[in-house]
Image: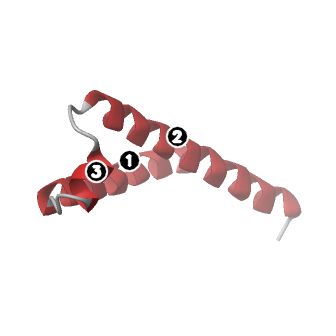
């Protein structure tokens, strides 16, 4: 295995994580309530499921974009 492939994998992983965090930050900003406050303090299970589904969906999209 060549070292350039390992470095490319690390760089693309970091880029994907940064894009995922930025996308979640944008969603956090455009929603009327604070997501973490709703999930942790008010135990809003539906919002927790929505946030998890968003993270999975964005991860699939970013992974597909990086892979191709």
- Left or right: 45, with 52 as reference point: left
Instruction: For mark 3, give the secondary structure.
Output: helix
Q: Which residue is depicted at the point 22% across and 51% down? A: 38
Instruction: For mark 2, give the secondary structure.
Output: helix
Q: Residue furthest top?
A: 30
Please name which of the two marks, 2 or 3, marks the residue nearer to the observer.
3
Q: In the image, which disc is placed on residue 37?
A: 3
**Marks 1 and 2 in Cβ contact (< 8 Å):** yes
Tell me the quarter of the picture where residue 26 sits.
Answer: top left
**Marks 2 and 3 in Cβ contact (< 8 Å):** no
Q: In the image, which disc is placed on residue 19?
A: 2
Q: In the image, which disc is placed on residue 58?
A: 1
Instruction: For mark 1, give the secondary structure.
Output: helix
Q: Position of residue 34 (x, y in %)?
A: 28, 41
- Left or right: 44, with 63 as reference point: left
Looking at the image, tell me whether mark 1 or mark 2 is earlier in sequence order: 2
Q: Residue furthest right?
A: 3
Q: Which residue is depicted at the point 42% across and 37% down? A: 25
Q: Position of residue 19 (x, y in %)?
A: 52, 40
Q: Residue furthest bottom?
A: 1
Q: Nearer the viewer, residue 39 or 51?
A: 39
Looking at the image, tell me whether mark 2 or mark 3 is earlier in sequence order: 2
Q: In the image, which disc is placed on residue 27?
A: none
Q: Nearer the viewer, residue 45 or 68?
A: 45
Looking at the image, tell me whether mark 3 or mark 1 is earlier in sequence order: 3
Q: Which residue is depicted at the point 78% across and 62% down? A: 6
**Marks 3 and 1 in Cβ contact (< 8 Å):** no
Please name which of the two marks, 3 or 1, marks the residue nearer to the observer.
3
- Cα separation, mark 3 vs mark 1, equals 22 Å
């Amino acid at each position: 295995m060549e070292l350039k492939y390992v470095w490319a994998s690390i760089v693309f992983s970091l880029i994907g994580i940064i894009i995922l965090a930025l996308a979640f930050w944008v969603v956090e900003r455009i929603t009327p309530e604070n997501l973490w406050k709703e999930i942790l303090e008010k135990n809003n299970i539906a919002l927790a499921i929505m946030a998890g589904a968003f993270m999975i969906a964005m991860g699939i999209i970013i992974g597909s974009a990086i892979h191709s």
